[in-house]
Image (cartoon, rainbow, N blue to C red):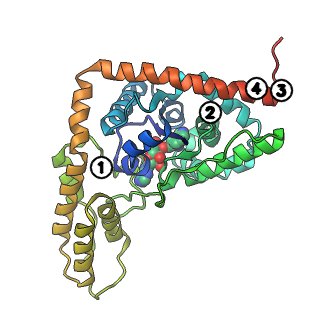
Amino acid sequence: MKTVVSGIRSTGNLHLGNYYGALRNFIKMQNENRCFFFIADYHSLTTHPNPDDLYPNVKSVLTEYLAAGLDPEVATIYIQSDIPEVTELYLMLNMHAYMGELAKTSSFKEKARKQPENVNAGLLTYPTLMAADILIHNADEVPVGKDQEQHLEMTRRFARRFNNFYKVEYFKEPIAYSNGSQMIKIPGLDGSGKMGKSEGNCIYLNDDPKVIQKKVMKALTDQGPTEENSPKPECIENLFTIMKIISTADTYNYFDEQWNKCAIRYGDLKKQLATDIIAATDPIRERIKEIEADPNILHNAITLGRDKARESAQKTIKDVREIMGFRNF
Ligand code: TYM
């Protein structure tokens, strides 16, 4: 059985990008693998160090994880900061991570540009903390969206480097959990490359259906095609990308054909897309309400998950300490 590890930063509610990037095939994934799903609250401090937000944000990610179908009896769900072994491994991996490679990471360069007043060491070492999250359970696969590809590549490099340095074959080199398909990138509806919290262009899982409708109807479009079978500009391609993931193949093919025939009506396409997004997320919103009404659900999930996650993490740390030469007196 494979070990699968996945995390989401606690920076607010989950959006379609998180859902289709990381939680796709959730039910199948947890039934077929040894799954660890956690909330990356330490990672959130690299950009959002606000004590008033920390707990509510962790709570909403946890609620939405469960609402999306994660079963704490089957998978292990926990909060990153509940597992001290993660930070211990992070520290150890940092001894073998180099300033140059960390500073070259795309996400670091982007964040440093966005928050020049707060280019902290946590941001620089974000990839080693992420590697610690993954390697603490010696994962085989990691469900992530396309934006995390470089971080995953670095995790493999850190694992390989550790093995080579200490002349062991301890860590596996984890790959993306893809289920045979490519890594997903959900684009923004504002014509931008990526749907993301910091891009401010998200459709959230818990958005009211009316809000979803409004956001989709406002999506950026162009004048429409003037030549048959012409390539789609980015803003239109984005709508089709989302449609391909969320709607049925028949729906997608119908609108694609309309595009190719220069007969497309963007209003119809958006209406259909909004309907399909609302239908796909309706059960999640229902379940969010149920979970919010019963605080025991979160408490029980976390209590169960924390113990299972620690047991696995403690085993890894014991081995790593041995490999690195730590000895008891
Ligand atoms: P975060 O919180 O930014 O995003 C959580 C997950 O959602 C995916 N995602 C997307 N996928 C497709 N299209 C999008 N527009 C989109 N936006 C977000 C991300 O790829 C991610 O899978 N560094 C991670 C959190 C993390 C982690 C880990 C993940 C920390 N430790 C260990 C896996 C394993 C992050 O920032 O995710």
| Horizontal arrangement in the rendering, residue 317 relative to residue 23 (left or right) | right
Which quadrant holds residue 239? bottom left
- On residue 136, the disc is 2
The residue at which mark 1 appears reads as 203
The residue at which mark 3 appears reads as 325
Q: Amino acid at mark 1?
A: Ile
Q: Amino acid at mark 2?
A: Ile
Q: Give residue 21's position: percent from left, percent from top.
A: 42, 51
Q: Amino acid at mark 4?
A: Arg
Q: CA distance from mark 3 to mark 1?
A: 49 Å
Q: CA distance from mark 2 to mark 4?
A: 12 Å
Which quadrant holds residue 273? bottom left
| Horizontal arrangement in the rendering, residue 245 relative to residue 311 (left or right) | left
Can see residue 135? yes
**Mark 1 or mark 2: whose residue is earlier in sequence:** 2
- On residue 321, the disc is 4
From this view, report whether residue 320 is shown above or below residue 269: above
SS of the residue under disc 1: loop
Crowd rating for badge 1 (residues with CA inside 10 Å; few <14, some 14–19, many 20+):
many
Crowd rating for badge 2 (residues with CA inside 10 Å; few <14, some 14–19, many 20+):
many
User: Which of 129/226 is in front?
Assistant: 129
Can see residue 88? no
Which residue is pictured at 40% across the width and 27% down the height?
A: 73
Q: Give residue 171's position: percent from left, percent from top.
A: 69, 40
From this view, report whether residue 9 is shown above or below residue 211: above
SS of the residue under disc 3: loop
Q: CA distance from mark 2 to mark 3?
A: 18 Å
